[in-house]
Amino acid sequence: MYKEEYAVVLDYLSRGYSSSYVGEPVVQALGTSWFTLLELVPRDGVTLNLEQRVYIGPEERKEVKFIKGRLEYERLTQTGRNELPAIIDQIIKENEQKYVEFFNKARPISVRKHSLELLPSIGKKHMQAILDERDIKPFESFEDMAKRVHLLPDPVRVVRERVQHELEGEDVKYYMFTAPPRKERPEFQRRR
């Protein structure tokens, strides 16, 4: 369900992690559909650049040998963390209609809380203004939202901050834009 077809390079470690004995190249990347943090191994002889988009889907991959797996936010390099906000912004802007549609279709998550309120800088007043305006006519773009909702914070920034919060994973109950982390399997317990 949370499959990624493409990823954007956050960091390229030509000799792998300093703590690794193997020394094979490693790529830290961000999926473009679900903002999944991934660890990739490039094909032999391939050097990848920061912000490069690479195919990681099921067909033949030109740049990537294999996907090592999902990457925890804490394991991102400093370069990866520095690149993350700009890459998230780029992905949001490239898929603007998807995120505008979120604002058009967002629903309450409980009797007391609306999913729009989970976005940073969106309180009850902004939420109500968004709901009122979308009832009149669905939003067509971020620019349309900014024109129609008075003093609305930058929607790209708001979505980016929520995505980063979900990736960091601290105190996250609802995942709206990212793939939720995999649940840890309970340790095997022996019978006595």
Image (cartoon, grey):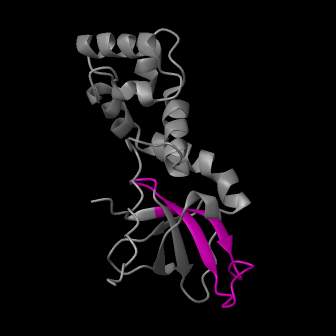
Q: Position of residue 119 (x, y in %)?
A: 46, 29
Question: Residue 11 colored magenta?
Answer: yes
As displayed, is residue 127 above or below residue 179?
Answer: above
**Quadrant that contains the N terminus:** bottom left
Give the residue drawn at x 68%, y 80%: 16
Check if residue 63 falls in the magenta segment.
no
Q: Position of residue 12 (x, y in %)?
A: 66, 71
On screen, residue 74 versus residue 19, left or right, reads: left
- Placement of 127 over or under 31, stated as above or below: above
Between 155 and 48, the one nearer to me in the picture: 155
Q: Residue at x 47, y 17 (%)?
A: 123
Using the image, determine if residue 163 lies above or below residue 45.
above
Picture coordinates of residue 32, whole percent (x, y): 44, 55
Name, please, the residue furthest toward the front.
192
Q: Name the residue nearer the viewer: 13 or 169.
A: 169
Indicate left or right for 130 with 138 as reference.
Answer: right
Instruction: State which quarter of the image contains the C terminus.
Output: bottom left
> x%, y% of residue 94?
45, 44
For the point 54% across and 62% down, which residue is it?
72
Residue stretch in magenta: 7-35
Q: How many marks?
A: 0
Residue in the image at 48% along x and 35% along y: 159
